[in-house]
Image: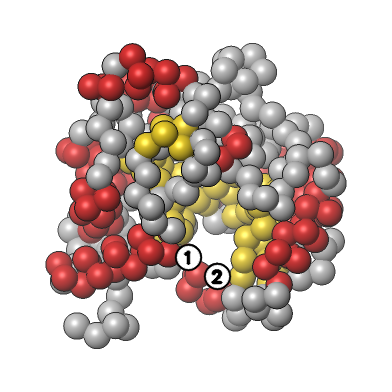
Amino acid sequence: MGEDIFYYNEFGAYLRGIFGCKVQKITLDGGFTCPNRDGKVGRGGCTYCNNQTFNPAYCHRHLPVKQQMLEGISFFSHKYPDMRYLAYFQAYTNTYDSLENLKQRYQEALTVEGCVGIVIGTRPDCMPPELLLYLQELAKRTFVLVEYGIESVNDTTLKRINRGHDYTCAVDAVERTAAHGIPVGAHIILGLPGEDKEEIMRQATVLSRLPLTTLKLHQLQLIRGTRMAAEYSECPEDFKLFELDDYIETVIDYVERLRPDIVLERFASQSPKELLIAPDWGLKNHELVDKIKRRMRERSTWQGRLYK
């Protein structure tokens, strides 16, 4: 089997197909909060969440969006002078504000030279109809991708991790967004407490029914300062943290069951060492990707091989 074999739909290739060049996401903090923290939906946030794990060194919440973009571009541009950039609103819930404030933040990022679009990370319960209409119009002029934190398709799990919404809410948000002609991404955590291998594989089948464009997979990580870390210290037997080889096999089994056209953006999260309790595999993301591809080659498999 040659090196050019199709293993899975890669996000970098997806962006090159749209823009014809290398494209880098610049992580931004728009200064938003979350309805699962301020009391509208709940307090304390999701049990696994510590937003310090999201923001890179160049991303500072107190800086204007435009300055964050410029500092992020400066961070990357020395490597690839001809690179283009996507403004990635990631921290907290980036559709949770007035429409005017949201439009101002998005437009501020899009005015930066070299910015060719935006990616908006949000919750399924925070996509009002008027914002969707605005994004539909914006997508006629620039690239727009909305990424929803779905995390699990199991309502028992969602309640346990204090998500504040059920899976039906996620289905509604994804379908409404796709119906407006906007590419939709999803974020999923593999290995949440209570979910065994059978449930994880079922999830791949269930997600494949949604009109998703992209998908991010992350391993469950225990992060200092979270409620989940406290739960783990009290009842470690409730958790099954992946060993590296087991995670690689699980990811491949999962990808085999996914719809073949879904674009896979990433397979793991890399939290700062000072915040990470476990698991610590000592790998960078690109090293994990290389191991996954090598193992897929050994297994003679590819995305969607078992998709029905």
From the viewer's perspective, tell me whether residue 279 is left or right of residue 308. Answer: right
Label 2, secondary structure: give it: helix
Residue 158 is tagged as: none
Kind of residue sitting beneath label 1: Phe
Instruction: Find residue 140 and report its horizontal and vertical position in percent.
Output: 70, 62
Instruction: Find residue 82 and report its horizontal and vertical position in percent.
Output: 69, 80
Identify the coloring: secondary structure
Given contact means CB atoms under 8 Å apart, are the residues at marks 2 and 1 in contact?
A: yes
Q: CA distance from mark 2 to mark 1?
A: 6 Å
Q: Which residue is mark 2?
A: 15
Locate residue 150: give its quadrant: top left
Q: Residue at x 41, y 42 (%)?
A: 188
Q: Residue at x 61, y 79 (%)?
A: 21
Is residue 186 among what the camera can see?
A: no
Pick the front one: 28 or 141: 28
**Label 1: few (<14), some or many (≥20) within 10 Å?**
some
Kind of residue sitting beneath label 2: Leu
From the viewer's perspective, tell me whether residue 133 is left or right of residue 5. Answer: right
From the viewer's perspective, tell me whether residue 147 is left or right of residue 195. Answer: right
Q: Which residue is mark 1?
A: 11
